[in-house]
Amino acid sequence: MIVVLHPQCTPDQQEAVLQRIREAGLVPHLSQGVLRTVIGVIGDDRTKEQLRTMLEAMDGVERVVKVLQPYKLVSREFQPHTTVVPVGPVRIGGPEVVLIAGPCSVESRDQILQAAQAVKQAGAVMLRGGAFKPRTSPYSFQGLEEEGLRLLAEARQATGLPVVTEVMDARQLELVLRYADMVQIGARNMQNYTLLREVGRARCPVLLKRGPAATLEETLLAAEYLLAEGNPHVALCERGLRSFDNHTRFLLDISAVPVLQRLSHLPVLVDPSQAAGKRQWVPPLARAAVAAGADGLLVEVHPDPERALSDGPQQLRPAEFAELVPQLRRVAQAVGRDLAATAAGAPV
Amino acid sequence: MIVVLHPQCTPDQQEAVLQRIREAGLVPHLSQGVLRTVIGVIGDDRTKEQLRTMLEAMDGVERVVKVLQPYKLVSREFQPHTTVVPVGPVRIGGPEVVLIAGPCSVESRDQILQAAQAVKQAGAVMLRGGAFKPRTSPYSFQGLEEEGLRLLAEARQATGLPVVTEVMDARQLELVLRYADMVQIGARNMQNYTLLREVGRARCPVLLKRGPAATLEETLLAAEYLLAEGNPHVALCERGLRSFDNHTRFLLDISAVPVLQRLSHLPVLVDPSQAAGKRQWVPPLARAAVAAGADGLLVEVHPDPERALSDGPQQLRPAEFAELVPQLRRVAQAVGRDLAATAAGAPV
Amino acid sequence: MIVVLHPQCTPDQQEAVLQRIREAGLVPHLSQGVLRTVIGVIGDDRTKEQLRTMLEAMDGVERVVKVLQPYKLVSREFQPHTTVVPVGPVRIGGPEVVLIAGPCSVESRDQILQAAQAVKQAGAVMLRGGAFKPRTSPYSFQGLEEEGLRLLAEARQATGLPVVTEVMDARQLELVLRYADMVQIGARNMQNYTLLREVGRARCPVLLKRGPAATLEETLLAAEYLLAEGNPHVALCERGLRSFDNHTRFLLDISAVPVLQRLSHLPVLVDPSQAAGKRQWVPPLARAAVAAGADGLLVEVHPDPERALSDGPQQLRPAEFAELVPQLRRVAQAVGRDLAATAAGAPV
Amino acid sequence: MIVVLHPQCTPDQQEAVLQRIREAGLVPHLSQGVLRTVIGVIGDDRTKEQLRTMLEAMDGVERVVKVLQPYKLVSREFQPHTTVVPVGPVRIGGPEVVLIAGPCSVESRDQILQAAQAVKQAGAVMLRGGAFKPRTSPYSFQGLEEEGLRLLAEARQATGLPVVTEVMDARQLELVLRYADMVQIGARNMQNYTLLREVGRARCPVLLKRGPAATLEETLLAAEYLLAEGNPHVALCERGLRSFDNHTRFLLDISAVPVLQRLSHLPVLVDPSQAAGKRQWVPPLARAAVAAGADGLLVEVHPDPERALSDGPQQLRPAEFAELVPQLRRVAQAVGRDLAATAAGAPV
């Protein structure tokens, strides 16, 4: 790290800073410029977060600049090859783009079975659907909970599609893992560190969504919690940021796809539905995500969105999704990839 | 609510919309303008969130405008007088401004006792200090956990100051309540609905921090979860929003104070330390918060910030806090209030 | 528009509101709900902006909801077919995607001629280059001004590529139009209404960039200034929003492409270079823009970015641009379009 | 500045970077850490912006960190004492807090004379009012232009209050200066560099408003344009940022007051009206601004806001302003200042 001293830093203050660096077992290199004195600190500053904030708190210090990113296990510098997350027969992070689709919430047996069969026939290779639903209002539909998990498992049985579903609380984890192939940590829980640690210990495939105001560094540090507990099976997901224009629900940060892929070896998915808020914007955002290099998409599809118990306006109808998939395949091929195919021989 | 139809809405689509409103037991009022047809829906739309999203999902609907806010129990319309939250001898939401101070984290017996005595002598009436710490990086100090709670209780014993501390997970709640007088739900957990429900059921005094990208409506709906479970003892806290300038850590939304006080009957506190990120900005933000009408402040004070294990740069030294308090008292008096006084006879 | 009255609105206040609406020559429709009274105002509220703010300023009014968007001439409701902006032989807004490329600034005769020939050979059909440069710092290179315009005209002569360049002030307009085929109104000047009016009167092709914090409605109202003065030759351009993560320079709002195309009949371009800030992010953003349906791209290309006098880090080298173009062609074809071809027979 | 090299930077790339620094006449200091090599560049990097972006554009460079801020003349490092801007008998930046008040727009002789007398009687020492109005929609009232300026001069004659009014375009400057005592550069024109240069050359008192998405560094660089042209009479003004919550029109950045005052010697005003958007939020924001240390306020006051031709909802009535001023005086006194008094003997 590099410590920039205040122009009015006294000799005593400067000495105290140097002393503090030495106490931490690191070597300071003083460099006096015309207008500022800076101190370079040689050593791995990723594990020196505490030293950094201590130095920042000292009198005479103007600021401290990090040279290295504070995450390690998730960084491409640490692991140059892209992680491939296996979920049943599906491989997230390989050469092929993975389509995950299904309703926002599991609402009934008929609804989830219809949705699962429709998305499979259209070309999705994984099924999504919420059983525990984090809802902004306490008066909204909160999900079918365990019954929803059972219906998801039945839909997997019927279609062969592995299932991803959200876990909202560490205590639900064991239950969710009894039914699901991959757990989702939602955007609102991206910095629920208790949950992150437990999912890290469970070593199950995880889909970690970026929070709507999370920097990329914070997102990668949230993933670092998972890897630090021993779970390497992590896929990241961009789903839109809080912004000031309300034509869409969230502002999809399309640049997060290439930037995260450069900073980290973890695969990066995009959820265009959550960002769009209205179904009409889902197809262009989905195409853009594939063109930008996303390793997969999470698309909300509901057999009857006008009767959906949550987020109806942003869910595609099965026919709309079926029309979108070949577009996505052509875009994937245009950028040298292809869509992942449904496992042969699986029941429809 | 008001449904605005698309200019190309067909008669069949319009009829379907009217039908759906009637199915929900509500009465639609059609009004045909030159360029748009709108449908007014008479009835309490606060509990009709689901109908609203269903209508938005229908073909022929351009948008649906809410007439009422979606929260109810927390609204000033529902309860005109300001809620007073009692925490031991302290009253949050009364005529007097409540100063809560203490270190970011509990680090040791000496540290928390020194901090508690210093803030009490300066004029604080409650003690803050983190035992469970939500940290962006897994490599940062994560708090002393139960040992930290015990030390907080000891500091209360020594000073008479009631204690507020963060709870990060529903499973910690029972433990935290054994030691603390008020629990804090942190900004990162503002939409952790499982935690909100459990704290709601516990009916203990709660300090609910606004998330860094939460709208005021989302903040009030998070509080609505607490009240809906039967807990009326809720104080809100503004602590800064994510923004694009990095001279401060977060952007303090000072207007949140009067706006929340108008929309809701819950008291509103401000945490200038978290927003500032650097101790030099804490005093002006603290004064501004009192001038804007805040019902209290949460100020980080550490006996030796240069040795703090978390957030040292934003913690005031005891002498700096002692200098700030009379300024805050004068500002409080200038706006017709006063600072709450330490309970007479309590040990220092 | 719809006027929502406060729950405490008195009968006198309500009558005053009704009176004010009638004074404006419009018809109020009162609708009393259980918890709110609303007044529908029939009539074209686009030209009633003043009435709307007057009603909002009245006692007893909670808020006023617009039913119609405040722009008219730019709206797709007003003109259903997409505008095609002709710039020499180029057509912006037709079925083909238009590539505009060239350096950030014109720096020398050699530089602009090399750049023009390189981008033409790679497949661009228009040349960009700044002669008047709006620079954040007064100490930065401010452009070659008229000499830069002359060099642009020479580059057009040499390559046949029409030229777009920025105009920063109404007094420069006549001069710029002597040399350029299309004028750019930059993001910082999007709400420079004096400039907008004059460019509107000049009726030349215009590239209007969205400001970094402009809503889509504000962007369309800026374009409305141009059309209201009689200039229909307007193309919009998304170039990134101010946001909180600094891995890219601005946050490209990819959803602006389909949303603006739905709201308005004006063609929509994307500038991935300005958003990216670093050349490595330009190709994925450019591909995403085409996949999302952009009518064209503005890409910065410099023969020697390491010697560029402005924005070197975000400018592509000629070889990098030549590698990108076939990717963009494949993506354009994947979404049912193609890249616009250079006019046959033009000199290279 | 400090150049951080990529971990994969080759020896040739590193040598090219060192060579480029030497070419610029500066001395590089190489420092090889375990994981990164950094190069310190000794010298005044404020005038080296171009070198910085050239280095950033080079292969092998990860990023370049500025050690010094890029502004100079406006910095407190350059001039330690606070600038006092004289406007007639008023001193902006002295120990007393300056109240500037008046209507959003000048609408008629009666309106501006009434407003001027009312704000003077209440305690304002300067009059504001727009003659040239930058309006988002071309269909909104655009100001009385020269007639408005004449009426402002008449109001000054009647009350003795110096006048500040906005200039939107360099060509209007001479005209505006014939009538006004101080010119305002509005938020939308903060980066209109042509206008900044001309106002800089005019050396008149200037009120420079921060743009709604401008960083503090960009704001100070805009002011640097003024000082670089020889105009030292510059006051800055915070008026709210673009944000995601719509309860207020803009998000007042109260921390900008102390931060700008620390970074720069220029006085800092606050416009609570523009930020609030509704008159009910103006008093708490105005009090907060004074408590945070603002050197003055710009408050919109209209004799009849319900008939205002622009921004009626955010304009105070004269009685509301008269009620606010003593509150502001008490807050100013609480923080060791006072309100500036109207010049004795001036006509009312």
Image: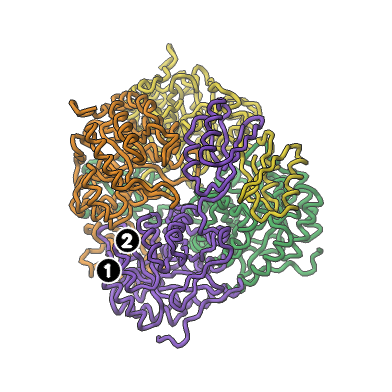
Chain colours: A orange, B purple, C yellow, D green
Residue B140 place in picture, x, y as percent? 27, 62
Residue at 46% x, 45% y is A243
In the displayed structure, B279 sits above or below D27; it is below
C82 left or right, relative to C64: left
- Disc 2 marks which residue? B170
Of the numbered discs 2 and 1, the one sitting upstream in the chain is 1
- Disc 1 marks which residue? B145
In the displayed structure, A158 sits above or below B244; it is above
Q: How many marks?
A: 2
**Chain letter of disc 1?**
B
In the displayed structure, C282 sits above or below C93; it is below
Residue type pointed to by label 2: Ala
Q: Nearer the viewer, residue C290 or C346?
A: C290
Residue at 51% x, 50% y is B70
Q: Nearer the viewer, residue D189 or D123?
A: D123
Residue C55 place in picture, x, y as percent? 69, 47
Q: Count neighbours of disc 2 (C-alpha within 10 A) and say few if under 14, some if 14 to 19, many if 20 or more.
A: many
Q: Nearer the viewer, residue B105 or C282?
A: B105
- In the image, farthest residue toward the top: C345
In the displayed structure, C253 sits above or below D43; it is above
Residue type pointed to by label 1: Glu
Residue D243 shows in this picture: no
Residue B63 shows in this picture: yes
Callout 2: SS: helix
Asked whether disc 2 touches disc 1, contact meaning CB atoms under 8 Å apart, the reply is no
Q: Count neighbours of disc 1 (C-alpha within 10 A) and say few if under 14, some if 14 to 19, many if 20 or more.
A: some
Q: Quadrant of the C terminus of chain D?
A: bottom right
